[in-house]
Amino acid sequence: MHIRPYEPKDAERCRMICIETATGHDTSLEKERKRLTTLFCDYFVENEPDVCFIVANDDDQAVGYIICAKNYAEYERVFRKEYVPRLKGIVPFHRLSCGVGLLSHRKYAKTHPAHLHIDLLPEAQRQGNGTKLMNCLFARLRELDVPGVFLGVSEKNTGALSFYRHIGFEELNRMFGTVIFGMKL
């Protein structure tokens, strides 16, 4: 396995990884798969591929990724305009629920303007790939003079909580069953 920059050919694999790594969701439902990829994947690969990295297997297929928005304010602006409307008919009260989530993250973005998601299929886990992905992203964000990054993770995902703490993230807050972590770069 190797780490490389995201390429447009990776889009569908990233969407599949987003769905397959979602815990606590009924991914047998098309609406739920659409909701997950709209909320947690599409913006990043469609708008900011320069801060997205892939773990690829020996066949050069993505088996994990780290995807990022380098400026949360810009992410929020584009997400509200282009991605929230895609949720119409999928998520009841989509504008309200997305709006609350977006607004709640603004305060972290003041000091940690980048926002990331990382997902690895089981075959790519426990081999140092998560750390390698983080290091690639951090190096790129430093090149771009981004001062910090944040993410949210379910408080039930104890493995991820340990991983983020081990990497050096600090807990910023807990809300709605989610732990918000941040790291200064």
Image (spheres, rainbow, N blue to C red):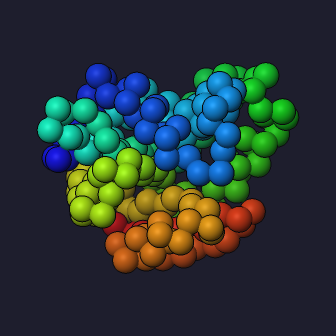
Q: Give the total of numbered labels.
A: 0
At 67% from the left edge and 40% from the top edge, which residue is drawn? 26
Residue 110 position by quadrant: bottom right
Residue 34 position within the rendered picture, expressed as x and y whole percent measured from the top left: 62, 27
Q: Is residue 57 left or right of residue 49?
A: left
Q: Is residue 78 visible?
A: yes
| Residue at (62% x, 67% y) in the render | 156
Q: Is residue 119 left or right of residue 49?
A: right
Q: Quadrant of residue 162?
A: bottom left
Quadrant in which the C terminus is drawn: bottom left
Q: Residue at x 62, y 69 (%)?
A: 155
In the image, residue 4 above or below residue 127: above
Given the current orientation, which residue lies at the most extreme right position?
93
| Rendering coords of residue 158 (x, y %) | 53, 72
Q: Foreground residue, 155 or 77?
A: 155
Residue 170 location (% of width, % of height) = 48, 76
Q: Is residue 104 above or below residue 35?
A: below
| 157 vs 129: above or below | below
